[in-house]
Each structure stands twice: as structure tokens, then as C-alpha cells.
Amino acid sequence: MSRSWVARCLVAAALLVVAAFAGGVGTASTGGGIPLPPGWPGHLLIGMSDPENGAADLRAGAPLEARYHYLSGGVNTNQGWLTWAQGDGSFVTNYIADSAASSFMPVFSLYEIRPSLPGIKNADEAAGDLLNLRTKATMRAWFAELRTFFDRASAAGGPVVLHVEPDLWGYIERAAHGDSAASVPVQVAATGFADLKGLANNAAGLAQAIVHMRDLYAPNVILGYHVSVWGTGEDISRSDPTDAHVDELAAQSAAFYRSLDANFDVLFAEFADRDSGYAVTVDHDGGEAWWEASDFARHARYLADLSRALSKRVVLWQIPLGNRVMRADDNTKFHYQDNRVEWLLGLQSRAHLTAYINAGVIGLLFGKAQPNDTCACDDAHDGVTNPAAIDGNLTGSLSADDDGGYFKRQATAYYHDGPLAIPAAVTRPAKATHRRHAPVLRVSASTSRASIKRGQRLFIDINVTSKGPAKALVAVQLFPPGAKRAAYQLPFRNQRFHDGRRRTLRLRFNVPRAAPTGQWVVKVGVFDPDWKRLYLWTEHAAQFTVR
């Protein structure tokens, strides 16, 4: 492939976005199929999260087409996005201008319900969100912020994407009765906004208000509705449902969206809210977060069902940036591993991308969700240059990015090979091969005494609860002070657990007369019955002192 051909492709992609900002791209269609949002290119675009004034650097690093940023901080905390930059919404104006100057489509994720008062004081996120929706002063401030956003975005002269309140719609769906958004109270017309007069004071009225205000003040804004797959009450990445059940869950999600009676332009969906390596290393989830081929197939099927049912295309958002290719990602802070970038943009990934495109996906937006997750940037601020020496095709690359430069390299390769065209029809992927995930477990431990003399007997209770039925091996290890190896270990083999029922396993430990004195640590691991797979590891389940 010639360099000149590649250059022409990249220039053409850039010009397409520039034309969109200039108003030169109208509503795209897919030959009688599900339409694309206005101004969207006819191919799968790739973007990533990017800070204020970062567009030029991002453009220099990779031929991406979109960049996104959160709008958050709370509507009544004096820390919200309206106070950023020079205040009065100037952050949005500046971000749009910076994006246009480097030929990016700007995307904003509005996340203001959760961090606002009074709900932010509630540790339960769902309860806090629902409280804010019912609080008149909070919602009045929220609608005022939304009006300011539309005023700033209307001057863009081209498409601006507003992704509205991730997670919120999932919590509303779970609180709804009979899949009806009208059953969830929200202060809408009651806020006193003239534009909202006559709209119902419920979640359906909220969605209708958002669309109505967009139509009035900023018709160039593409509205994104956030799909939380767990809004149905079941997370398919954890439950491993059959294809028929995936279809049922997608139909349930579609029914809730229809109950809003509001026409958003595009659906936003996600994979996870953290790198898999973070989930294992920090959250100790036992590997549940890692996806396999069957998980991706179920995910694509659910999206295809939803896309076809609602006649809406899909943007996959906040895709984790960790990888297992570069030496930079070693499951330490800012360098956690994941496999989504490899699946979507790695070697032999065109087939995977094609499956998602056929399922209705038109954009991939990569970015970290947790502060310490992996970034395709130098968030670690260590300036460390990382060689790519594991994958032979990448040898010789140097990057100071926390992910070792893998994402930008693979995104560049995607555009080098030519971006994939979006087909008119949305189709389901091939039937998934189902596997059973690790059980969802909770483990705690306690000792009969906090302090014990040498030669005495200690009882250690291990409490295990499983979300669903499970069979497992529970290994208990006792570590003397400062030891790197266990001095004592006992496996409880072939243990069976049932839905939500706590089982207590008791270990009797006769403290040796020559046992080291000081603080001992109890560690607990839960494995499959053959020791081949770790389900959950609890590094510090309990402790006791030998004196």
C-alpha cells in the first residue's frame, strides 16, 4: 500500500469532519436502512477522551476523528462545568473550537445528576440519583445548565454530540414499574421553566424535555441516550445468558426506551467501567471482568437487537485502554491490563469490528473511567518511555503513554488499512458459544481470639456467600509476620454454595510452641474444584497476634 494512498485516506477523513463543522454534511443515510445521526461519516469512526486544549497533541499522535470530555462537578456545588475555564459555559465553547481547529468531532458526556446535592451525600448511587430527580431546586439548576450547553453548542456550525447522563437511565429503568418511565417521578414542568410547560413530572417528561430544548436551541446537537445493560436487572457479562434470553433482555430495554416517548439520535453503550486488570488486582473479582469470545458475541447480539428494535445506531463509549501486549501494562497503578483494544484493534481484529458494525455500532470512543486506570497518555506523569518488545510486529516502538503507545498505534493501523464502511442493515452476530463465568462471591473471616499464646488452639471462621449456585475449593493460608510463604494451609474441597446463603467453614489451628510471635495474617482464595482457575482472592481476610 503506497504512502500517498494512505495520506489521501487520512486527508479525506479529516476533510469529512471539517466539512461537517462547516455545514457541508447533511443527514447521512444507509440506503434505506437505519439512518446515521446528522453529520456522521459513513464509516466506523474512532475517538478517545481528551483534556481541555489537547486537540493538537491528540491529532499529532493518531488520525482519530472524535474526542470526548465529561461535563460534571454538580449543578449546585460551585464546582460544576459552568465554573470551568472562564465560567459561564466557556469550557464548552473552547472545547468545540479546539476540536474544530484539529478536525475532531466534539463529544460531551453530561454527568451532573449524580454529583449534585442533595443526592451526592447518599452513598447509594441509584438512591442519590432518584432523590436529585425528585428535588425541584436541583432539577431547575440542571435544566438551566442544559440550556447554557445548548446555547454554547449552537454556535459550532457543525455536529456536536451530547451523551446524556450515563448510568442514570439504567437506575430509572430499574426503578420503573412495568418498564414504564412514567412511573418514576422527576421534577420537570414543576421547575417553572417556560419551555417545559405541560410536560409530565416523570422520567418520560425528562427525556421529552431534553429533546424539546435541543430542537429549540441547538438542532446541530446529536443527542445520545445511554443504554445500561444492567438496567434490566441482569448484567449479561456476568450471567452468561442463552441467545434467546439475550433477545428477551434487549426487548425489555427497548420497551423501556419507547416508554420515554422521546427521539434521541443515537444509543451510547459500554463494555465496563474499569480495566479488567484493575478489577482483578484492586477489586479482587477473581477474573470475572475478563471477557472471552462468547462475551463479545452476546454483547454484539444485545446491541443488534436493540439497534433494530429502536432504529438507532450505537456508539461504544469509555472503552478501557489497557492491553496485554506492551510491557508498560503490568497491573500496577496507571498500567492495568485489559483486552478490549486488542479485540477491537489488534491483530486479526477486522472480523471483530465487522461483527460490531453489523450489529449497529458506528463509533468507538476509548477512555478510562477510574482515576488510576490505564490511559493512552502520560497520566502517570512519569515520562517513562516504554519499549514494545512482546509482539514482534511492534518491536522498536517507543512511547511515554501509560499503555505503551499501543492504542494510538493500532488506531493508526485501522485508518491506514481504510476505515470500515457502515452497512445499511443491522444483523445479529453468529450464535455465541456459552461458558459459565466464575461465581460472584463474597468472603470474610474472623478469629475466635484476637491474641493467642503459643501452644493454644485458635478457631478461624471463613464466611462465604455466592450470588448463584457454585461448587468451589476454598483455600485458607496463614502467614507469620513478614513471611512470604504460608506456614499453614488448608483446602476445603468440593464446597457447594447456594443463592445468597452464607456458609461458614471452620478451621482449627493449634498454634505451634515454636510459632513466630507477632501479627499473623489470614488469606483466603476461592478456586474452581480442580485448582485451575482462581475465582476470588482475599489478601487480608483476618489477622491475629501470637504472643
Image (tube, grey):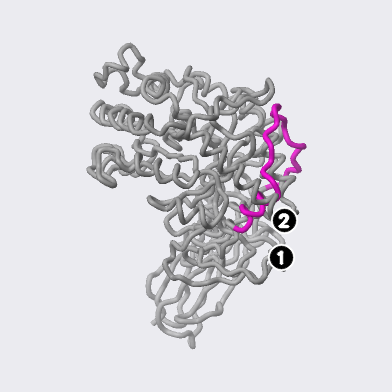
First to last magenta residue range? 409-436
Residue at horizontal 60%, vertical 66%?
Answer: 475
| Chief secondary structure of the magenta portion | loop
Instruction: Tell me the quarter of the image containing the C terminus.
Output: bottom left
At label 2, which amino acid type do we have?
Leu
Q: Position of residue 33 (x, y in %)?
A: 67, 23
Is residue 106 left or right of 407 when viewed as pictured?
A: left
Instruction: Work out whether residue 503 can be spotted.
Output: no
Q: Residues within 10 Å of mark 2 (few under 14, many from 20)?
A: few
User: Alpha-carbon distance for marks 2 and 1?
Assistant: 9 Å
- Is there a contact, CB below 8 Å, between mark 2 and mark 1? yes
Q: Is residue 50 above or below residue 127?
A: below
Instruction: Work out whether residue 316 can be spotted.
Output: yes
Residue 393: image tag: 1
Residue 347: image tag: 2
Which residue occupies the foreground of this view, 450 or 42?
42
Instruction: Tell me the quarter of the image containing the N terminus.
Output: bottom right
